[in-house]
Image: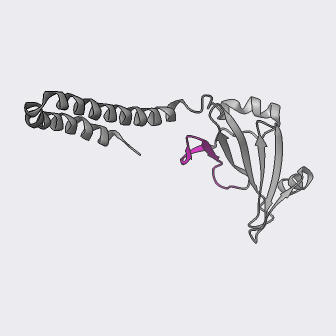
Amino acid sequence: MNYSIYIIIGLLFVPLVIFFAYRKDYKKNPTDFTKSIRAVGAVLLAILLFVGLKEGSKHIIPLKKNYGIEFNSERKNFGIPTIEKDWEKNKYESDQFATYWWKPEPRIGHFKKVIEFGLLNAKSETDYYQNDSIEKTFAWSKFDYNKKSFEYFLEKSNGEMEKIDKSEFEKYIYK
């Protein structure tokens, strides 16, 4: 959400409120006026801090986010499929904690990679495959960076999903 408009309205609205409050309240009781201004200022400061921290965290967290094509040499060390040079990052699906990479059409074989992030670095990478000889089925492998291990899955044409072992996964992707 874009909070800029709210900040601008707040910066315009607060001085007007203070001006009218000054004219009305200060003349009645200067001590009460000072207390109310401090209370309003504390609330505004808390709101600005909250919004600022929330928006700022999007640019800072996760701390390490260079898991694009430049990370392919590390992927090879782990045995994770790489991102090809013609793949594109999907900015609409990607967010602070997930990055989606897509192969250009035709999307047969290894066609999609999803990198999920924690606060510090990547948690997992999921690679999706479609075999052109078996219609409407997908297989994917998920590498967990914490466990340094893979899990393999297959979704059949009827929508049924099952966990499979590595040999079954390799039969599917190399048919």
Q: Which residue is drawn at 66% across and 34% down?
A: 69
Was residue 61 drawn as part of the magenta stretch in this picture?
Answer: no
- For the residue pair 18 and 28, the one nearer the viewer reads as 28
Indicate the quadrant where residue 8 lies. top left
- Residue range of the region highlighted in magenta in the rendering: 88-107
Q: Main secondary structure of the magenta part?
A: strand
Q: From the viewer's side, name the closer residue of 152 and 113.
A: 152
Give the left or right position of residue 11, taking residue 89 as reference: left
Left or right of 60 on screen, residue 145: right
- Which residue ends up furthest to the bottom in the rendered image? 158
Count numbered badges in the picture: 0
Q: In this view, does 28 lie to the left or right of 6?
A: left
- Left or right of 113, for residue 146: right
| Residue shown at the point (83%, 57%) measured from the top left | 163
Residue 96 among those drawn in magenta = yes
Locate residue 132, reporting x and y percent: 77, 61
Vertically, is 167 above or below 65? below
Q: In which quarter of the image is the C terminus?
A: bottom right
At 72% from the left edge and 47% from the top edge, which residue is drawn?
Answer: 126
Query: Which image quadrant for residue 81?
Result: top right
Question: Where in the figure is residue 65, as x and y percent of width and height?
Answer: 61, 32
Q: Where is residue 43 in the image (x, y as percent from the top left)?
A: 33, 35
- In the foreground, 119 or 104: 119
**Rendered position, 127 above or below 76:** below
Q: Is residue 135 above or below residue 119?
A: below
Q: Give the image location of residue 143, x and y in percent.
A: 78, 42
Residue at the farthest right position: 167
Q: Which colour scheme is used?
A: one colour
> Which residue occupies the foreground of this view, 130 or 9?
9
